[in-house]
Amino acid sequence: MRETLVERFPKCFMPKGAIKRPLMVGIREQITARCPHLTEIEVGIALRDYTRGNHKYRSQLFCGAERVNLDGEVVGYVSQEEAESAGRALMEAGLPELAADIARSLPQIAA
């Protein structure tokens, strides 16, 4: 299923092993509208595999990173809260180096 998204939307979805771009919020609905032959379950499985299958997706969720739509166009940015959540998930996965990379993208609070 994931391969279908990679083939159909190569400016958005990267093949396994490649560095991934953060996806726009609401991309599930965009996929469903443009691929009516795919069921909601199939789309959900493909997105889960793409975003949670390994650390490569979360490791790109830097604060301010560009989010793309199915055509690869920038349509938003990763928020501070989303970056913090990604950093926590990377720590829980035992990947402190990647979590530290995310932390460096967060705004620093003056003492």
Image (cartoon, rainbow, N blue to C red):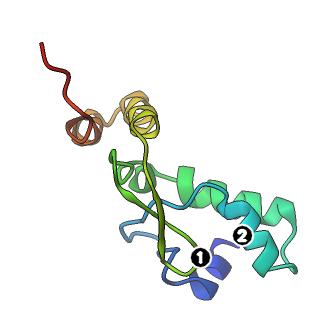
- Tell whether 97 sits left or right of 8: left
Q: Residue 110: percent from the left, percent from the top?
A: 14, 19
Q: Residues within 10 Å of mark 2 (few under 14, many from 20)?
A: few
> Circles 2 and 1: CB distance less than 8 Å?
yes
- Tell whether 7 sits left or right of 28: left
Q: Residue 23: percent from the left, percent from the top?
A: 53, 61
Q: Amino acid at mark 2?
A: Gln
Q: Which mark is residue 30?
A: 2
Q: Which residue is mark 1?
A: 70
Q: Is residue 16 above or below residue 99?
A: below
Q: Which quadrant: the C terminus? A: top left
Tell me the quarter of the picture where residue 94 sits: top left
Q: Residue at x 28, y 41 (%)?
A: 102
Front residue of this view, candidates 91 and 105? 105
Q: Which type of secondary structure does the marked residue at label 1 adopt?
A: loop
Front residue of this view, candidates 77 and 20? 77
